[in-house]
Image (spheres, rainbow, N blue to C red):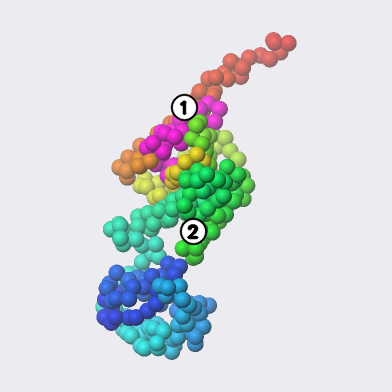
Amino acid sequence: MLYSSGRITPNINLPIIRGGLHLREDSSLDYESELCDLMELCMSPDKCPTNREGMVFDKSGRKEPVVFDKRPTLSIQGGMVFDKSGRKEPVVFDKQPPCLNKWDDKKKGTDTKKGMYQYLTDEIRNAASQVGNIIAGGNKRTNGCADGRLDSALKEGPFLEEMRAKLLQTNPTWDIQISPPRASCDIIINGLQINLKMTDCKTSDNSSNKRAIYYSITGQTDYPYSSTWNDFLAKLEEAKAANKIKTVRDPMTEYHYLVKNKSTGEVLFKSIFDIHTYISNPSNDLQINWKNEFANKEYYTSDEQYLNKVATLLECVQKSVRDMMQRNSAFAQTNIRDLL
């Protein structure tokens, strides 16, 4: 549990801690939640760096031991924290503080949930932009100073592994799971389901996934591995009866596409409901033209248009199913024995 205090009275001289805790060396209120992150760390029995155990890092990257006389406590009356010199400094709370989320991004002036989502998606875009690029004039891979092209030898598996490693360098506490083969998504990052597309953007891409669509509409993960569109309809009707169809957007429970242009190295990261144009296809149900999506990179669906966008997606798939039935109706209704 993280807390935000009513006020912090002293100037606490604490070192910078990497991995999500960034304590500034002044007494402004901006770092109060990070201070509480440190308090949380200290109160964890398996993480508390007491008696010169545990290491933190200052701005230069130098390791310094943190010494605590005793484990600090949080209370309404105020706890006690200790910097590396051992000097005691009080943390004063005016009242029981409210909970905060670790990903709260105050700089963007958004509420906690939106700030969390924005920070997560920005980090994923940045990491994906660095993975697999090659140096201009050669085929040597690099983490920077690249000409934008993607190493053609790089496959999805190694791409995901490298992106995961980059994300954990700056966010070591994140939960990042690379999915097994045949799963409905390629990677899950802090609960966000993501499908990786590595493309040259020359053709439309097959993007039909019943489990992903159902999850995005309901937030539920109980969809069967194999199903027909009739089964899909039955599950939606069941979800509606149980009042589980989302009526407002929750991007953290929406399926996302992470697209890397193999020719330019450009990255696109979007929710299924922020796709500009859904394309029906009788053979593949749903397609997306990534060249068009890159051209409409800034397009997104507002909260007011959310339910209309959901309906547009389902109607696109419905058209594909109808066209498939009509395209094959003659064969379906023919008496085969009359042909022999």
Q: Which amino acid type is marked by label 1?
A: Lys
Q: Which residue is found at the position 55% from the left and 55% from the top?
A: 162
Q: In this view, does 90 lie above or below 288?
A: below
**Position in image of residue 102 (x %, y %):** 40, 65
Task: Please state the extent of the stretch shown in magenta in the rendering.
Answer: 270-296
State whether residue 218 appears in this view: no
Residue placed farthest to the right in the image? 340
**Position in image of residue 315 (x %, y %):** 43, 31
Q: Which residue is found at the position 50% from the left and 46% from the top?
A: 136
Ranked by sequence position, the earlier of labels 1 and 2 is 2
Direction from residue 133 to residue 276 in the image, left or right: left
- How far apart marks 1 and 2 lie (CA) works out to 40 Å
Q: In this view, does 109 lie above or below 13?
A: above
Q: In which quadrant will I find the C terminus?
A: top right
In reply to whether residue 278 is colored magenta, the answer given is yes
Task: Name the front one of labels 1 and 2.
Answer: 2
**Position in image of residue 314 (x %, y %):** 44, 34
Q: In which quarter of the image is residue 68?
A: bottom left
Residue 167's disc is 2
Q: Which residue is found at the position 69% from the left and 10% from the top?
A: 338
